[in-house]
Structures are given as C-alpha cells and as structure tokens.
C-alpha cells in the first residue's frame, strides 16, 4: 500500500498575469533599461545649457509671432525653385532606378551570374547606398562637384539605388520559378529567360517601388538645398539665415502642399498597379 | 465561306501593364517631352565637373584610406552624442506615443480624444526631421538636446500612428470577453489590448531605434549635435580621409543595428 508522499502543488490564491519568475525577469529588464537611459541622458546633456533650454517657450512664441502671417508675396519667387525640386526628385529617381535594375538582377539569388563573387558585391552596393541618407550624399556631392541641381540629382539617385535595388531583388527572388523553367525548357537564352520569364512577373512591383521612391524623393529633395544642392531648400536656407521667418512659414506651406500632392499621386499610381 | 483569318507569323509579347496603345503612346510622348524640358533646365558646367572629378578621386582615395586617428576625439564625441541621443529619444518617444497611440485608436476612446491624438500624429508626420530640427535648434540652442527633442517628436508620429493602427486591427472578440467580465477601461487595456499589440510595439520600437540612429547622423548638419555635425565639419575642412572614416563608422553601426533589430523582430514573431 502506498502512501501519498507528495503534497498537491500549491497554487496561488489570486490569479496573476505571469508566473513570478517571468515577472522578476521583466522587472530586472525594465530596471536595466531605466539605468541605461539615465546614463545616456547624463552623457548627452553634459554640455547642455539648461538656462537656454528653459528659455525655449519664449523663443518659440517669438518665432511663432515672426512667422505669422506667412508672407504670401514671396510665392511667385518660389515657382522656379519648386520646378527645380520636382526635376531633381524625378530625374534622381530615374537615374537611381536605371542603376538599381542591373544591381538588383545581379543581387537576386535566382538571376545572379555568380553567387560567390557578384552577389556580395551587388549587396555591398545596396547596403552602402541605403545606410547613407540622401542629405549626407548631397553634402559629399556638393563638396565634390559644387553646389547646384546636379549634386542634388546625383544624391537622390545614389540613395535610391539601394532602396529600389533591395526591394526589387526581393521581388525577383520571390518570383514564381515555374514560368522561368518553362521558358528555359523552350531553349531560350539567359537573356530571353529573364525577359520573358522574370520581367513580366516583377514589372508591377517595379513600377510600384519606383512610384513609392519617387514620393520619398520629392519629400527629401525639398530639403537637399539646405546643404547647397539646389531647389526650394536653398530658399529655405537663405530665409533662415536672414531670419526671415515669415518667408520660412510660406516655404513650409509650399513644402507641405508638395509633399501631400506627391503622396496622393504615388498612392493613386500604386493602387492602379496592385 | 470566308477567308481564313490571317494570323501574324511572329509572336509578339502582349503588353503587360497598359493595354490601350493610345495611352501607351501618350505616356511615352509625355515622358519624352518632360525629359527634354527637365534636362534643358539643367545647367551643366563642364569645367566645374572636370574639376569635380579630380576632387571625387581625391575623396575616393580618402574613403579607401580612412583616417580614424587624427580626429578621433571629435569622432568619439559625435558618436557618443549620436548613440545617446538615439536611445534616449527612442525611449522618450515610446513613453509619449503609447498614450497618444491609444488615444488615436478609434475603438477605444471617445471621438474628440481620437481627433486630437490623430491631429498630433499628423503634425508630427507632416514635417521632416531636418525641418523640425531647424526650429528646435533655434529654440533650444545648438547641441544634442535639440536633436533629442527632434527625434522624440518624430518618433511620436511614427510609433503612435502604427500603434493606433495595430490597436484598431485587434481581435474584437477578446476585448468583448474581457468587457463581459465587468472589467474597467484600464483592465480592458491591460488584459485585452496590450497582449495583442505588444509584439508589434516592440518590433516597431526596434525599427524606430534603427531609424533614429540614421536620422541622428543627419540632423547634426543643422546644428543638432551628433556624428552628422562631425561629418559636416570634416567635409568643410576638406578632410576627406576623416570624412571617409566617419561614413564607414556610420555604415557599420547602421548595419549592426539593422541586423540585430531584424533578428529580434523575427524572434518575436
């Protein structure tokens, strides 16, 4: 005859969300995060002038008063820079897309000529282009080829290569292998396989990605002028430098309107494609 | 008896996107016309470009032989500012965007609160980081504190919007079940909403951490501290080897953050 040696497990009387050990781990995790935050806060604000920060509300009111009302007489002067900005974004997108297509085909696992040599090189191009913001590209290019639209176009193009290249090569890798195989079975050459098997599959994605990037590029091209790359950002920089806040207000309205319109347009194009 | 239909002897690939040939031609002509106009407006100075190529080669040499040492103190300072700014701004952004995100979810709050929170989100999303940074630098003075404020403000727009969208998409049956037990509004948030959106919130926060680092490298150009300011100085001094070193550091950190955050996100899902 056996006795019941083990007592029944003791359950807590009150139901809780998590077992105690998980709760403890969570508390420690949050505590560590708080400590890290405080350390970072102290490091970051080592040189902060707190009286200047405390002064911020009065500064904000001051700037706000200077901005209102926006100087609308400034609008006609902005038409040419606005046209430049649109051109910068569009030509930059065009250049970026033209560069990105071969890079994407070299980077995609199913179309790359060599997995060991070409694919890593193409991925490196994509990564380098993606991790540097277009404003930094513009900063570099203005230093190299001088201020002007060309620097802006190249900056936009170089930044777009990575973005379009990454999304496009992912689309290529996700394409259905069966049509590709069927076309290869007809005795088609490599280029023909790509042309008839893969291109039709990724074409809608390609246009969608391009429209998406064009929208982002419009947004970014409005500020590239801050570092001298032409367009409406140059006017912004000039107005800020001369403390003409009522002109800055006008410029912000124009930029906002441009961004909203381009976003709407890109969304329309993408909806038509998908 | 009618004559047999004449089939073309060569197969041509059917058009994939735009079926109507008139539209296709109109688009082609329009695009060509635009290109002529746009390229015509472009003023190219051949002599300046030739000079630029030389400088470009100079820069490329600097990039291939990056100089980490001679400006290491500046680089270190910029990096510390950027990294601390990124972390603090992300944390502060999450703390602020959770209440705003809950307020911007249509299925949880009253209409006026919803509209007010959506307005905050729209304001934050409409302006780019760099423009916000210009204003905040004018208000708070130069340095990383202005950068911190900028990134926090920008994070709110991003996180609160995506969080609100996630909350609006939650499974309604769970919140209904919790509500049926007589739970208060806070209990509803805690037991029905939070478990459903937490993985997504963590994923979004990590993604925003990644974005905030990238942006912290940029807003320094307008005086908001960080590695961007160091880079700007290096380029203005034509020290391309130091600039190359800074760019390499930025690329490496961006890659590290991106890979680790995407790994954590994959692990969470």
Image (cartoon, coloured by chain):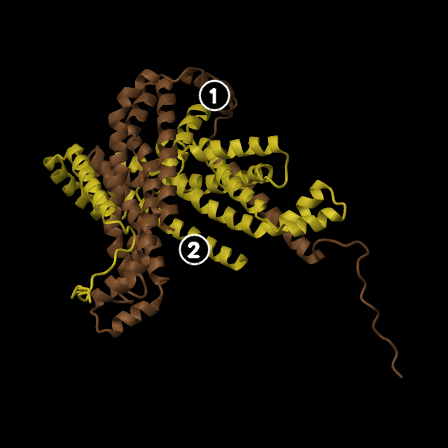
Chain colours: A brown, B yellow
Q: Residue furthest left?
A: B47
- Residue A112 rendering spot, x and y as whole percentages: 27, 64
Q: Give residue B40's quadrant in the image.
A: top left
Question: At 32% from the left edge and 32% from the top edge, which residue is drawn?
Answer: A222
Q: Foreground: A183 or A34?
A: A183
Q: Residue at x 71, y 45 (%)?
A: B187
Between the residue at mark 2 and the residue at mark 1, the CA separation in whole angstroms equals: 39 Å
Q: Is residue A166 left or right of residue A118?
A: right
Residue linked to disc 2 = B259
Residue A153 at what x, y percent from top left?
24, 39
Q: Are marks 2 and 1 on the same chain?
A: no
Judge whether residue B65 can be spotted in this image: no
Residue farthest to the front? B1
Q: Is residue A205 visible?
A: yes
Q: Residues within 10 Å of mark 1 (few under 14, many from 20)?
A: some
The residue tagged 1 is: A60
Image height of A208 relative to B37, above or below: below
Q: Which chain is indicated by disc 2?
A: B
């Amino acid at each position: 005859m056996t006795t019941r040696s083990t007592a029944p497990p003791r359950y807590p009387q009150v139901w809780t969300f998590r077992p105690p050990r998980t709760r403890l781990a969570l508390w420690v995790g949050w505590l560590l995060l708080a400590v890290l935050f405080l350390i970072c806060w102290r490091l970051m604000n080592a040189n902060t002038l707190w009286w200047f920060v405390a002064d911020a509300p009065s500064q904000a009111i001051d700037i706000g008063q200077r901005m209102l009302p926006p100087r609308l007489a400034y609008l006609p002067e902005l038409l040419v820079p606005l046209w430049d900005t649109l051109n910068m974004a569009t030509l930059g997108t065009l250049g970026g897309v033209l560069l990105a297509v071969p890079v994407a085909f070299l980077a995609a696992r199913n179309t790359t000529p060599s997995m060991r040599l070409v694919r890593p090189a193409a991925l490196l191009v994509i990564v380098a282009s993606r991790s540097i913001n277009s404003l930094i590209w513009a900063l570099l290019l203005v230093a190299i080829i001088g201020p002007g639209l060309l620097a802006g176009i190249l900056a936009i193009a170089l930044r777009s290569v990575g973005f379009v290249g990454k999304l496009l090569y992912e689309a290529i890798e996700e394409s259905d292998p069966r049509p590709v195989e069927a076309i290869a079975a007809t005795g088609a050459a490599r280029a023909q396989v790509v042309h008839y098997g893969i291109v039709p599959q990724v074409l809608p994605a390609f246009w969608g990605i391009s429209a998406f990037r064009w929208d982002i590029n419009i947004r970014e091209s409005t500020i590239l002028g801050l570092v001298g790359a032409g367009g409406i950002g140059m006017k912004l920089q000039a107005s800020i430098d001369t403390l003409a806040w009522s002109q800055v207000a006008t410029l912000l309205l124009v930029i906002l309107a441009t961004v909203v319109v381009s976003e709407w347009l890109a969304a329309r194009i993408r909806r038509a494609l998908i | 008896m009618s004559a047999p239909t004449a089939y073309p002897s060569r197969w041509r690939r059917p058009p994939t996107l735009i079926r109507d040939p008139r539209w296709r031609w109109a688009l082609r002509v329009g695009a060509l016309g635009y290109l002529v106009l746009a390229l015509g407006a472009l003023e190219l100075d051949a002599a300046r470009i030739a000079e630029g190529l030389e400088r470009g080669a100079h820069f490329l040499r600097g990039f291939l032989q990056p100089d980490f040492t001679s400006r290491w103190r500046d680089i270190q300072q910029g990096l510390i500012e950027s990294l601390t700014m990124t972390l603090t701004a992300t944390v502060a952004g999450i703390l602020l965007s959770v209440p705003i995100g809950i307020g911007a979810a249509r299925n949880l709050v009253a209409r006026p609160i919803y509209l007010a929170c959506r307005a905050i989100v729209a304001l934050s999303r409409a302006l780019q980081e760099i423009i916000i940074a210009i204003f905040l630098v004018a208000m708070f003075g130069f340095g990383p504190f202005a950068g911190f404020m900028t990134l926090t403000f920008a994070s709110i727009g991003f996180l609160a919007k995506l969080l609100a969208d996630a909350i609006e998409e939650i499974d309604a049956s769970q919140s209904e079940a919790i509500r049926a037990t007589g739970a208060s509004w806070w209990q509803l948030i805690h037991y029905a909403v939070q478990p459903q959106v937490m993985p997504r919130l963590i994923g979004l926060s990590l993604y925003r951490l990644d974005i905030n680092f990238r942006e912290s490298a940029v807003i320094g150009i307008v005086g908001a501290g960080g590695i961007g300011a160091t880079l700007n100085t290096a380029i203005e001094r034509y020290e391309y080897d130091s600039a190359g070193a800074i760019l390499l550091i930025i690329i490496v950190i961006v890659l590290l953050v991106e890979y680790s955050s995407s790994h954590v996100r994959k692990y969470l899902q």
